[in-house]
Image (cartoon, coloured by chain):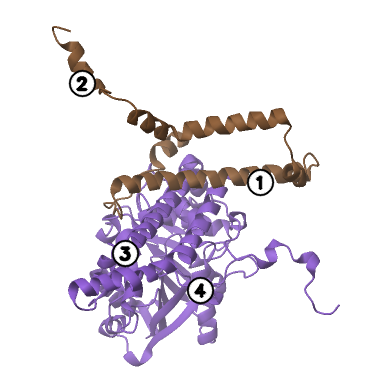
Chain colours: A brown, B purple
Amino acid sequence: MSLDLALALSSAKPAGSRPYFMDPEVERVLNILMATVQELAVTRERLDTLERLLEAKGVVAQSEIERFEPTKDQAAERGLWMQEYLNRVLRTLQQEAEAMQTKGDLASEEVALEVSRADA
Amino acid sequence: MDGSPDLKNAGPAQSYSGPPDYRVVGRHGVFPETSHDEIARFNFLAHMNRHLSTRIMPAVKTAWERRAGPAFETRESRAPNDRHEVRKALLQDPYYQAWSALRRATMEQRQQAGRWIALRQAEILSAKVDGLTKAGDRLELDPALPIPRYVSAVDHHCMPGSYHREVFPGDVSGAANYDSGIFATTGGALGRFSDGGGHAVVKWVRKTLPDFRPHRILDIGANLGQNVLPIAQAFPDAEVIALDVGAPMLRYGAARAKSLGVENVRFVQGDGSDLSRWATGSFDWVQTTMTLHELSLTSIKAIFAETFRVLSHGGIVLHVEQPQYAADMPLFEQAMRDWDAFYNNEPFWSTMHELDLDGFMVEAGFDRAKLIHDGVTAVVDKDVFPDAADDEGEDYGRKAAWHVIGAMK
């Protein structure tokens, strides 16, 4: 039950109307971004803990991580992952670019009317 | 040895200045458990607050001096008359907007992070508190006590539920959230148990009034008792009352005190503006620590009057607060200090800081010749925590450096 409480209430709004300092849509994106920045810091700290524990147990030294050189195949796998990742993150720009090159693109709402006409 | 630095020990810790890792936080029997990532979240927030105050906020002044201030003077053909005009002009400046949006976001993230921790174990915490408080007379609640408007209207510090609401009967998650997260908001500047203000008061009293031996001490707006415990520990023969309107804070505070082995504090639910349950001259010390700014004009006057009444002759009242907006404080600084009033739900903050507190105390009955004014900074373990006394910077309203305003009856 406590986990349900936490899921339902941890992000609750405090009493009092919220001030916005920027265009609310911009500030909304900033708020989401800063929460994401926080979670990246959390992941970084966890990774740091892991590396230090691995070193303390003699599994992997941090210097080995620093000196690590991928083989050609590993580098290719990592490069492909990075390409996939950037594609995913910057999806919206690719779609904007495609839209600029498309002529006569219809909105689904327009097509909805069209395909519903008696003479369609 | 020639006195040169021992380079073998000159690791990063030697030159590090910044918030300590959250893991040095003081834990007691009802402190919430925190996972690795929950701690990392608080570490991020402590650093975020520091970054905002040391790296970003200084340029708000630049924006005022070079941009928003000159724009105001061009538009109005005069300088601003008061801090409200400065703040409203700053609201138009993109840098102030960005700083404000980030500061608000950081406060909301801090509440979210602490609430997640406290709520996910809310039932366990409630049971632990119950176990530590059900026997004995260290906790006295009054469910019929009306919650003052100044507490219920908006949630202070954007803290959902404020000091008084419960998610279920016996819930203390609000208090656990407050207790665990204040470290992140202050970057550890209040010390392990967030009690640097209480230790500062003890240090001040010992130095200023070395022969003072209080028998009965009243702390008004005691919250979860973090600042009154150092006082109770410093004067173990005194009987201490921690008074607050918020039942969850008091329950948690009583359990916290019990687990820390402080036995001479009783946590009582009540409103400082009505101390009629105590006879005239009942206390020789009345204390408030960062409480006045969360009241209202009528309650502050009533509290001053009641404080005078319940104090014995020779007794002292001490109010610890951020400095007042004196005439020589630049309007820009006043406007910056007002930020928490309007954007962090501290609605009385602005008015309180312009009040003639001396006049109020004289009106309450105190002798103007026996008023007390001084400054204190948080007393912390300097090996681990940042010391506000050594800090040249300013965090406009959040720095752990306060004024003491008080009186001897």
Give the labeled residue for mark 2.
Answer: A110
**Do tags 3 and 2 sit on the same chain?**
no
| Residue B148 in view of the camera | yes
**Looking at the image, how many numbered discs can be counted on the residues?**
4
Give the labeled residue for mark 1.
Answer: A48
Q: CA distance from mark 3 to mark 2?
A: 50 Å
Amino acid under disc 2: Glu
Amino acid under disc 3: Ala
Farthest residue, direction left: A118
**Do tags 1 and 4 sit on the same chain?**
no
Work out whether mark 3 precedes mark 4 in sequence or the reverse, and give the earlier one: 4
Q: CA distance from mark 1 to mark 4?
A: 48 Å
Amino acid under disc 4: Ala
Which SS class for mark 1?
helix
**Do tags 1 and 3 sit on the same chain?**
no
Height in image: B101 above or below B306?
A: above
Give the labeled residue for mark 3.
Answer: B341
* Residues at discs 1 and 3 in contact (Cβ within 8 Å): no
Question: Is B396 displayed left or right of B25 in the figure?
Answer: left
Q: Residue at x 52, y 61 (%)?
A: B187
Height in image: B381 above or below A30?
A: below
**Do tags 2 and 4 sit on the same chain?**
no
Mark 4 packing: few (<14 Cα in 10 Å), some, or many (20+)? some
Quadrant in which residue A82 is drawn: top right
Give the labeled residue for mark 4.
Answer: B238
Question: Is B65 displayed left or right of B181 in the figure?
Answer: left
